[in-house]
Amino acid sequence: MTTDRRAGDVADLVERARGGEPRAVARLISLVEDRSPQLREVSAALTPLVGRAHLVGITGSPGVGKSTSTSALVTALRAQGRRVGVLAVDPTSPFSGGALLGDRVRMQDHALDEGVYIRSMASRGHLGGLSATAPQALRVLDAAGCDVVLVETVGVGQSEVEIAGLADTTLVLLAPGMGDGIQAAKAGILEIGDVFVVNKADREGAQATRRELRSVVAMTDRVDGAWKPPILLTTATTGDGVDDVVTAITDHHDHLERSGELTRRRLARVRREIEALALAEVSSRFAHLSGDARLDTLSERVLAGETDPFAAADRLVEHL
């Protein structure tokens, strides 16, 4: 009876979320983020409803203006009549485990707009600048009718390349005077960027940063017919250049659809998600073996030289 009631609750939440009810969307994302026992039901209910939203990842070093740029992009997208979701992954508080300095504070201009849903999620120590539960949270926003979902990463430097595996389009932000061109080359960001944006273009050195990026991107090997990432200048605080970024994002989506790359990227994304869930399940089962007599016996045999660790591991896996 409890299971039936829970399934009914999930179905009701999903239906209300599809109608754009903010509280239902918030509740579903909370179930995802808290790894609720209902998570499997949520996933099963959402999966047939997704695939329409354009997922745009926004990454870059701390201080380049990711949150301000995200807010400016929301304004430009809403001017086109598009429903927008924002998933802002924040650093985790070491005390509460929650999101630290939530980006919603910087996006108050959109707080009363029913066509915008903004949610901060804590990274909770997950490497790569994202939250481990981000894929399911994105499904919620997709199913809720968002045309575009912006995913803003923590801003932790070289590990942020993970965003490319989650988004359809990856937007890399840089700023003049921060050595970002060199850092981008180090971090491998040049390979994952679909659109490059030099923000704070009103500062000295913006054109130089753009030239540096253009020369480095030109040296990147690309097959014939491949997308050529534009390098744009913006001043997010005033909105200058932001419409050009929206145009580039739309153009990239059109290119992905024409070339078939959109389907390939999404298949690869789902494959990685399935692998991660399977590994998490195996890891969970191994955790339960910590006090198992079989593990103790195998350990003793390895220590005695009767078998080797690889053979012992194979035997242990057989019992899972």
Image (tube, grey):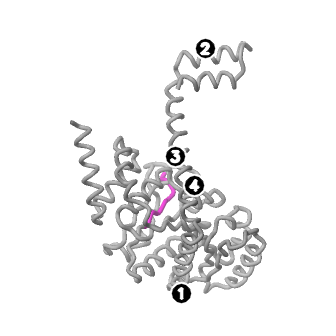
Can you give x and y, in whole percent of width and height, for residue 244 in the image? 55, 84
Q: Amino acid at mark 4?
A: Ala
Disc 4 residue crowd, few under 14, some 14–19, many 20+, Cα 10 Å: some
Task: Identify the element where label 4 is drawn.
Answer: helix
**Image quadrant of residue 181?**
bottom right
Q: Amino acid at mark 2?
A: Thr
The answer to whether marks 4 and 3 mark residues whose Cβ atoms lie closer than 8 Å is no
Above or below, 32 against 59 in this view is above
Q: Measure the C-alpha gap from mark 4 to mark 3.
A: 10 Å
Look at mark 1 in the image and give the residue it sits on. Answer: 240
Q: Earlier in the sequence, mark 4 or mark 3?
A: 4
Look at mark 2 in the image and give the residue it sits on. Answer: 297
Numbered disc in front, either 2 or 1: 2
Q: Earlier in the sequence, mark 2 or mark 1?
A: 1
Q: Earlier in the sequence, mark 4 or mark 1?
A: 1
Numbered disc in front, either 4 or 2: 4
- Circle on res. 274: 3
